[in-house]
Image (cartoon, rainbow, N blue to C red):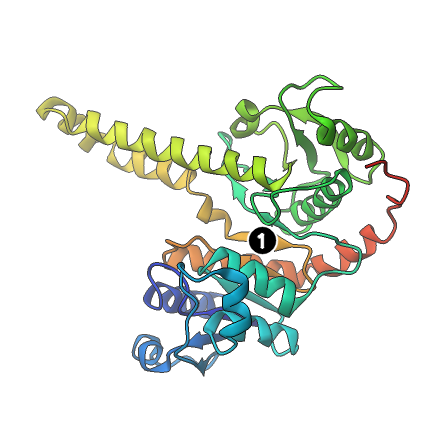
Amino acid sequence: MKIAIDAMGGDHAPKEIVQGALEAAKEMKDIEITLIGDETKISPLLGDSSRINIIHTKEVITGEDEPVRAVKRKKNSSLVMMANEVKEKRADACISAGNTGALMSAGLFVVGRIKGIERPALSPTLPTLDGRGFLLLDVGANVDAKPRHLVQYAVMGSIYSEKVRQIDNPKVGLLNVGTEDGKGNDLSKKAFELLKDSPVNFIGNVEARDLLEGAADVVVTDGFTGNVALKTIEGTAMMMFHMMKETFMSNMKTKLAAGLVKSDLKGLKAKLDYSEYGGAGLFGLSAPVIKAHGSSNARAIYNAINQARHMVEQNVTTMIEDTIGKIDLTNEEE
């Protein structure tokens, strides 16, 4: 199994990318990794690893680049060359911690969509109180969506959760403003009716306040709402840890208390760190494409590699294509 990685994408590239690749190659004997980026910066960090190759390029897509234009103009960038490795069948999956918009554009224009999928979905796995986590899609690949797109998201999320996350008959919920049937805007109401007849374990509407309690294993929504929900969860978690740190550091008594619970706090932080679940999958493409967080460390890259590996092993892409091909959405009323 071959996995291509954009070695120059992310806040801590290439150091953390290379370190994560080294850890993965050491633990996962069935993979071969290709790092795409500046060889003069990668090689000193790599050492001797027989299952990690380098494709040299100095061109990089930055966070300031306009995504579509950058993908079209910077064809020798590490991100575009990574996607091309998948397109040309020299790699089975690819990973980048770089520009999210550029990765989505490269996924669409270079890797290509699964037959029957109209719009891919960006899908992170977020933490829950019980440690099980839930998949949220879409969180920004498409800010607008039609009811049938949410059904496709539900199918893709359900297959991924079952095959990669090993959840039996995953519960699928529709993010809404209330749990009762008939709630929401026109998109939600129409999607609800379609989801009831789809080949997933649809449990109905779920509210945002119940997400972290594990109300569903898969939660579907349009990209605008999903991105707002994701950023709200991220911001709340950061604020809470900041407030806890301030409280513990406020005086000598609380500093002593912090010393006693230091290991427990680290465990809590790890539990709430969604990078432990891997990156955000760009579902709906003809091969696994993983968006690692921009601030990914080596551990996060390792988890993203393992995530891509499981997707290839379980043949998730083919299963999605086969399932989508059996769903008739031609009579949907827009």
Residue occupied by mark 1: 281
Up-down: is 11 above or below 3? above
The residue shown at (54%, 43%) is 125
User: Residue at image x 72%, y 32%?
Assistant: 187
Q: In which quarter of the image is the N terminus?
A: bottom right
The tally of labels here is 1
295, 158: nearer the viewer: 295
In the shown orientation, is residue 79 left or right of residue 106? left
Q: In which quarter of the image is the C terminus?
A: top right
Residue at (50% x, 48% y) in the render: 277
* Residue 145 at x, y percent in the picture: 69, 41
Quadrant housing residue 195: top right
Q: Which residue is drawn at 55% across and 58% down?
A: 290
List x then y, in percent, for residue 23: 41, 65
Quarter holding residue 48: bottom left
Using the image, determine if residue 20 lies above or below residue 127: below
Name the spot of residue 152 as percent of width and height, x first: 75, 45
- Of residue 39 and residue 19, the one placed in the foreground of this image is 39
Mark 1, other Cα within 10 Å: few <14 / some 14–19 / many ≥20: many
- Residue 305 visible, this orientation: no
Q: Is label 1 in a helix, a strand or a loop?
A: strand
One can see residue 41 in this view: yes
Task: Examine the rendered structure and indicate whether residue 135 appears above or below residue 292.
Answer: above
Q: Which amino acid does label 1 sit on?
A: Gly
Q: Nearer the viewer, residue 10 or 34?
A: 10
**Picture coordinates of residue 60 (x, y %)?**
41, 71
